[in-house]
Image (spheres, rainbow, N blue to C red):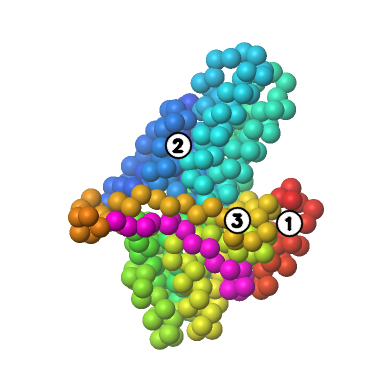
Amino acid sequence: MDLGGRDILPTIRWDGGKVRIIDQVLLPHDFRIVECGDYRDLIEAIKGMRIRGAPAIGIAGAFALALGARSIKEKDVGSFLMRLEAIASEISSARPTAVNLEWAVNRLMEKARRAEDVDSIPDILLSEAEEILREDIETSISIGVLGSELVNDGDVVLTHCNTGGLATGGWGTALAIIYEAKRQGKRVKVFVDETRPLLQGARLTAWELKRAGIDVSIVCDSSAPYLMRKGMVSLVLVGADRIARNGDFANKIGTYGLALAANANGIPFYVAAPTSTIDPNLMDGEGINVEVRDESEVLSLCGRRIGPEGVGAYNPAFDVTPGELVDALITEKMVVRRPVGEGIGILTRGSDLM
C-alpha cells in the first residue's frame, strides 16, 4: 500500500496472536499501547471507549471475532459456527449506533460460513480482518484527497468529536481532509469543539492536529454558533457513525446543533464517512438506535463529580441530523452533493451495500 509518506497512527493492529490498540482513554497525557488477547478484552475496550470511532470499532469487531474463533474448541462445523454466531452477537451489541461494527462482523461471518473446514476458519477470519484494516486506510486516503478539494487556502474549519487516525485504521475521515489540505500546502486553521461529556475533541482531536503541525484551538461546544455568526468559520466538517438512505445521519451528540447553526449562517456543512457507514436497511434517521450511556459521564469530569449528589443525568451519545442540512457527503468513492439522499441512491445502486 502506497501511503505517500502519510503519518498513519497505529490505532489498532494484530501482533503475535494479540490485538494492540492505542488506549484513547489515557490521551492526551499518556500514550500507551495495550494488548487484547481475548475477544472479551476487545468488547470491553469498545464499550469503555478505549477504542472508538465508527471505522475503528468496525476493525476492532473484526479482530475480536478472529480472536473469538481461536478460542472455540468444537471440531464439528455446525457446532463451531453456532458458537461463532454467539460470539459475533456479543461483539455486534457492544455499541449499537455505529453501523461499521455490525457490518464488519457480518462480513467475517459470511467468510466463515463459506469455509470448507473448521481448521481453516480462524486464519480466514484473521485475513479478512487484516483486509478490512487495509481497506480502511486506503478509504481514508481517498476521502482525504476528494474532500481536500472543498478546502481552500486560508480556510477556518470547525469540527466536532474525533474523526482522525484514532477513529479509523490510522488516517481519518474528516480530519484526513484537513491533513490532505495541509499536504497540498494550504494554510488551514481548525476550531475543535471540546465535545462534552468525554471531551474527544479537546483530548483527542486537538492532540492529533497539534501532532500534525496544524493550527488548532479548542472551543466550548456552545460557542460554535457564535463563531459562525461572527464570520470566524469557513466550513463545518464532521464524521458519521450511521447514515440512512435519505442522508439522515447519526454522529456524536451536538452535531445536529452545528448543522442548524451552519445552515442559519450560510456556512457549508460537510460530512465525511466511508460507504460502509451507510446503512441500506434504513430509509431515514428515525430508525437509528441512539446509544444512551451511563449518567456518570455527565456528572463527573476527570474522575471528580461535578453535579450535586442526588441529581441524575440523561446521556445520549449521539444525535441524528437530517440529510437536508448536509451540503455534501464525502466518501471514498465520490463527493455526494445536496440533496445527499439522491446521491446516496446513485452511490449505492448496484453495490454490495444494497
Sequence-wise first label, 1 or 2: 2
Is 222 on the left-hand or right-hand side of 19?
left
Sequence-wise first label, 2 or 3: 2
What's the CA distance linking mark 2 and mark 3?
A: 24 Å
At 49% across and 69% down in the image, what residue appears? Answer: 256
What's the CA distance linking mark 1 and mark 2?
A: 30 Å
Q: Which amino acid does label 2 sit on?
A: Ile
| Residue of label 2 | 43
Q: Nearer the viewer, mark 2 or mark 3?
A: 3
Q: Is mark 2 on a helix, strand or loop?
A: helix
Q: What element carries label 3?
A: helix
Picture coordinates of residue 274, whole percent (x, y): 61, 55
Pick the quarter of the image with the N terminus. top right
| Residue of label 3 | 287
Residue most toward the right? 350
What's the CA distance linking mark 1 and mark 3?
A: 19 Å
